[in-house]
């Protein structure tokens, strides 16, 4: 059974992995292109799994989980290459949702009804 990792641990693990190669991290523009590619692969897999476009019989049976993992890896590489702490980024965006967007959505009351 795999243990759960926090974001700091994941960022360190990716940095150690990339750090063993002379090439290091890609440039920000190349990283954005890689991320766009991974989002496209995720979209294709979601369309196959939940949309109206079934896979061809000769296509590999990838999973949404695998594509999300690929996207997360590239996102962490991108953040690391720009020296961005994703935990801090996450906290900032959650604070934004809790303040600016606090009344934007219809809340479910405590009884479970709308």
Image (cartoon, rainbow, N blue to C red):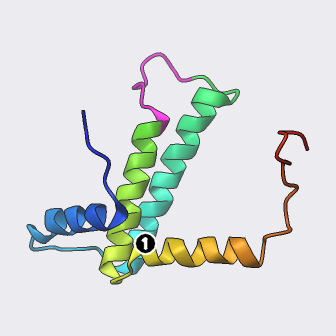
- Residue 99 position (above or below residue 33): below
Q: Position of residue 102 (x, y in %)?
A: 79, 70
Residue in front for this viewpoint, 73 or 95: 95
Could you tell me which quadrant the N terminus lies in? top left
- Residue 112 position (above or below residue 49): below
Q: What SS does tag 1 mark?
A: helix
Q: Position of residue 13 (x, y in %)?
A: 21, 62
**Is residue 5 shown in magenta?**
no
Give me the residue at 8% from left, 67% from top.
Answer: 20
Residue found at the far front of this picture: 111
Residue behind mark 1: 87
Residue 28, quarter of picture? bottom left
Give me the residue at 45% from left, 53% from top.
Answer: 38
Residue found at the far top of this picture: 57
Q: Position of residue 105 (x, y in %)?
A: 85, 60
**Mark 1, other Cα within 10 Å: few <14 / some 14–19 / many ≥20:** few
Residue in front for this viewpoint, 12 or 55: 12
Give me the residue at 70% from left, 71% from top.
Answer: 97
- Residue 46 position (above or below residue 35): above
**Is residue 61 shown in magenta?**
yes
Q: Which residues are magenta?
A: 55-64
Residue 81, quarter of picture? bottom left
Instruction: State whether the magenta stretch is mostly helix, strand or loop.
Output: loop
Give me the residue at 52% from left, 45% from top.
Answer: 42
Q: Is residue 93 left or right of residue 80?
A: right
Q: Is residue 23 left or right of residue 33?
A: left
Q: What is the number of callouts on the image?
A: 1
- Residue 31 position (above or below residue 35): below
Residue found at the far right of this picture: 114
Q: Position of residue 19 (x, y in %)?
A: 13, 71
Residue 114, quarter of picture? top right
């Amino acid at each position: 059974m795999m243990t759960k990792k926090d974001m700091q641990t994941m960022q360190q693990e990716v940095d150690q992995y990339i750090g063993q190669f002379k090439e290091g991290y890609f440039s920000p523009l190349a990283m954005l292109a890689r991320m766009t590619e991974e989002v496209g692969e995720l979209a294709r897999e979601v369309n196959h799994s939940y949309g109206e476009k079934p896979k061809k019989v000769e296509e590999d049976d990838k999973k949404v989980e695998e594509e999300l993992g690929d996207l997360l890896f590239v996102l962490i590489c991108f953040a690391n290459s720009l020296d961005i702490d994703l935990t801090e980024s996450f906290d900032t965006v959650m604070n934004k949702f809790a303040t600016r967007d606090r009344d934007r959505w219809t809340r479910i009351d405590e009884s479970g009804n709308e």
